[in-house]
Image (cartoon, helix red, strand yellow):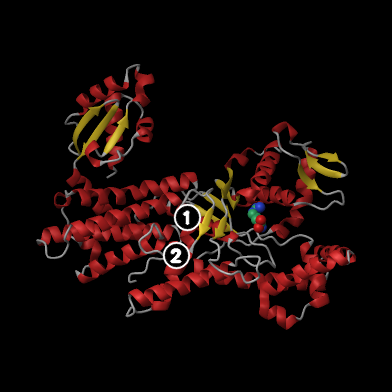
Amino acid sequence: MDFKLMVAQAIAKASEIDIETVESALTTPPNADMGDFAFPCFVLAKQLKKSPIVIAKELAEKMQGVNSYIDSVNPEGGYLNVFINKAEYANSVLKEVLSAGNDYGKSGEGNGKNICLDYSSINIAKPSHIGHLSTTVIGNALSRIYTHLGYKTISINHLGDWGTQFGKLIVAYKLWGVREEVEKGSVLALMDLYVRFHEEAEKNPKLDDEARAWFRRIEDGNDEAVALFDWFKKLTLESVQKIYDLLGVEFDSYAGESFYTPYMPAVIKEMQDKGVLKVDDGATIVDLSEYNMPPCLILKSDGATLYATRDITTAIYRKNTYDFHKLLYVVAYQQSLHFKQFFKVLELMGYDWVKDCEHVSYGMVSLEDGAMSTRKGKVVLLDDVLTAAIEKSRVIIEEKNPDLEDKDEIAKQVGVGAVVWLPLYNNRIKDIVFSYDKALNFDGETAPYAQYTHARCCSVLKKAEVFEKMSELDFNGKLLNDLESIELVKSIDALKDSIRSAAEKNEPYIIARRVIDICGKFNRFYYERRIMGEETSIQNSRLALCAATKTAIKIGLYLLGVNAPERM
Ligand code: ARG
């Protein structure tokens, strides 16, 4: 039973205002003695042509005793405070969570509609650095969240696998590379070659001409060029796969920039036919001055296509292939002009589905000074960050719980969870400074804290020997009428809304905050209320609440891409 909906229905009926308006305005008061739900009556003032104070009074009178789930309704200022029947409420939430288990909060609202997610989108021959953390973990979280809501998600790694830099790399490899060394050093060796190319090309500009020639050979399908490029690609994908395995990230497609080459001529012709192109100083552009944007470059004067040309072609291809309900690009905010420009071009081409495309942008991640030395003095490798976090969590576990079984696996889950959490705990757009100590703090608002609370619930349930049969626990909401229990029940209930609004705003942090709130409420409950040794009916009701907490934390963490070990 959805109590919020039920309250909204009762208010809608009494006020004769549509339920949507009522439900979206219904809030949760900051503290429980103001009611379980509060309805701001000013929302109806215009429609009902009355003051909020009068509306609140009238509604309160009409609603007395309408429904056995509502205990009382009080007007206060322009607000209507609704107190629900706590026992019924607790019963209904616990019943729902315990019977759904890990499916709690799932819904069919997505109706199988396709959501395309473009994320991680790494560049070939470049190592994944800390900058790839956000796109990868936000994209992964969104994919899990939409799936939970019944959408079908298509995760696409739009590889940066096209451009003259690959010609440069071939030149560098042929001049200075040694196959075995590159094989061994993988993507870092490729990066070295690339850096060397730039140093040498400054002294010898002829190298740039050679690089262009090699790039053309890749495009023309020359055997040697393609074989080398494919090898670079293989090395890059193998090295990033280790990171994806740690993060639990999977892609449905690795169609990158080069994949769209054959589709481009038709799209360029279409733009020409639709009259959106203009030649300017030899280059082909779309003039966007009317929209206060610099022009979108489509073809360079030598006829080469650009990043935007590829993205326009890609979006059209994705629409034709997946008929997406939404196409989300999880990409750093530095690229926001690029997205605005090419979205506008698609609009000018007459594609009204561009309204379903969204740049899901995010801020920068940097490391606290001295938190780690970078291997190359330039980039902070994601691999290194994850490895260091795992090692540090191993040390903490060794200190706190040396007898723990499976320490390596748990250290991995905790270390990775701590890192993954960073871009997920705040509004996406916020820049974050990474510190291992803060990330791994078991008492902060961190993944390890949530994992620890989850493990605590598991241990309570195991000690009571009900872990295997949580769904069969007998409970009675009347026995959960203390403040700590009710607050916890409410927070667990709110997870469903949090999941929905995380999807609506493409903001996983809403779930992360909810998980931390559930953990805080549980820990308060755990300190204030005795579980074991109480009369059986109380004990079982509290165990049921503990089981519901465990389930809710586990689901919340799962949706964020964080594992929840049973022991820590
Ligand atoms: N590879 C690009 C980069 O590292 C990100 C690509 C994002 N996706 C896209 N369709 N533009 O900057």
Give the amino acid at mark 2: Asp
Task: Provide residue 364's location: percent of width, then percent of height.
Answer: 57, 54
Task: Provide residue 134's location: percent of width, then percent of height.
Answer: 54, 57
Residue found 56% across the figure and 71% down from its top: 384
* In the image, farthest residue toward the top: 49
Residue found 24% across the figure and 37% down from its top: 35
Q: Nearer the viewer, residue 258 or 435?
A: 435
Give the amino acid at mark 1: Leu
In the picture, residue 467 is in which quadrant? bottom left
Q: Which residue is mark 2?
A: 437
Residue found 36% across the figure and 55% down from its top: 516
Report if residue 17 is visible in the image: yes
* In the image, farthest residue toward the right: 206
Q: Which residue is mark 1?
A: 424
| Front label number (2 vs 1) | 2
Question: Is the CB of the residue bearing disc 2 within 8 angstroms of ligand 1?
Answer: no
In the picture, residue 185 is in which quadrant? bottom right
Image marks 2 and 1: residues in contact by CB distance under 8 Å:
no
Q: Nearer the viewer, residue 422 or 489?
A: 422
- Asked if residue 202 is positioned above or below residue 148 in the image, the reply reads below
Locate the N terminus by quadrant: top left
Lower position in the chain sequence, tag 2 or tag 1: 1
